[in-house]
Image (spheres, rainbow, N blue to C red):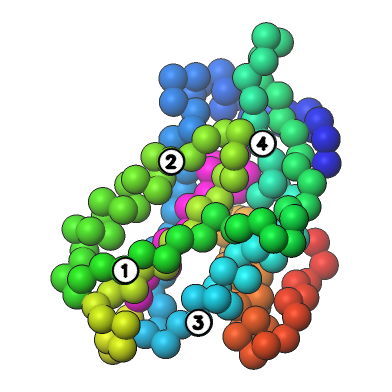
């Protein structure tokens, strides 16, 4: 927690993306079973944020340039950046529109992770859902995705079974 020096690639990022630094993220859209437990997903996302320090980084522009700060652990009652969105059966355009809005909503001084679960059709619909995971490039890279997805799946499975979430060592 507290001030963290910028890495060389973060310095480069701010030098080359000064116009719109908030909208430089990467995302993944996954298929979920119709029976996905959204409460377990929300719990897994919250634990992911608590476990991975980089997901709690914040950036602010000061008179002396960009500053990086590691936020402390979120309060137990804090809401994870997890959205539940209901959409009609033929929702490809709606998912694309919602995903673009979510990606454009990043602020460097706020959570740099957004997760949205799209439920398609009626509540008892047999249609699979979609899980959108968006991360700002300041807090992730291509290699990190594998670790984050594995931890998200492990946390989800533990929460779905009613167990406390324990993720592997950092």
Q: Which residue is mark 1?
A: 86
Residue 153 rendering spot, x and y as whole percentages:
59, 76
Q: Which residue is mark 3?
A: 37
Q: Residue furthest top?
A: 63
Whichever of labels 2 and 3 marks the residue nearer the N terminus, that label is 3
Mark 1 Cα within 10 Å, few/some/many (few <14, many 20+)? some
Dividing the picture into quarters, in which one does residue 88 lie? bottom left
Q: Which residue is mark 4?
A: 58
Whichever of labels 2 and 4 marks the residue nearer the N terminus, that label is 4
Disc assigned to residue 117: none
Q: Residue furthest left?
A: 90
What is the C-alpha distance between the residues marked 3 and 4? 30 Å
Which of pointers 2 and 1 indicates the residue nearer the eye?
A: 1
**Dividing the image into 4 quarters, which one contains the N terminus?**
top right
Mark 2 Cα within 10 Å, few/some/many (few <14, many 20+)? some
Mark 4 Cα within 10 Å, few/some/many (few <14, many 20+)? many
């Amino acid at each position: 927690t507290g001030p963290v020096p910028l890495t060389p690639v973060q310095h480069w990022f701010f030098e080359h993306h000064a116009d719109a630094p908030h909208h430089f993220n990467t995302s993944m859209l996954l298929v979920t079973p119709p029976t996905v437990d959204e409460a377990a997903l929300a719990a897994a996302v919250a634990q992911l944020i608590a476990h991975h320090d980089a997901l709690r980084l914040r950036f602010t522009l000061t008179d002396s340039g960009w500053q990086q700060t590691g936020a402390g652990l979120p309060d137990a009652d804090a809401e994870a950046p997890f959205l539940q969105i209901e959409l009609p059966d033929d929702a490809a355009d709606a998912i694309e529109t919602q995903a673009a809005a979510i990606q454009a909503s990043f602020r460097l001084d706020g959570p740099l992770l957004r997760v949205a679960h799209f439920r398609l059709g009626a509540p008892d619909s047999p249609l699979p859902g979609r899980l959108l995971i968006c991360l700002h490039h300041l807090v992730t890279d291509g290699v990190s995705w594998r670790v984050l997805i594995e931890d998200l799946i492990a946390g989800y499975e533990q929460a779905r079974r009613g167990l406390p979430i324990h993720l592997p060592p950092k």
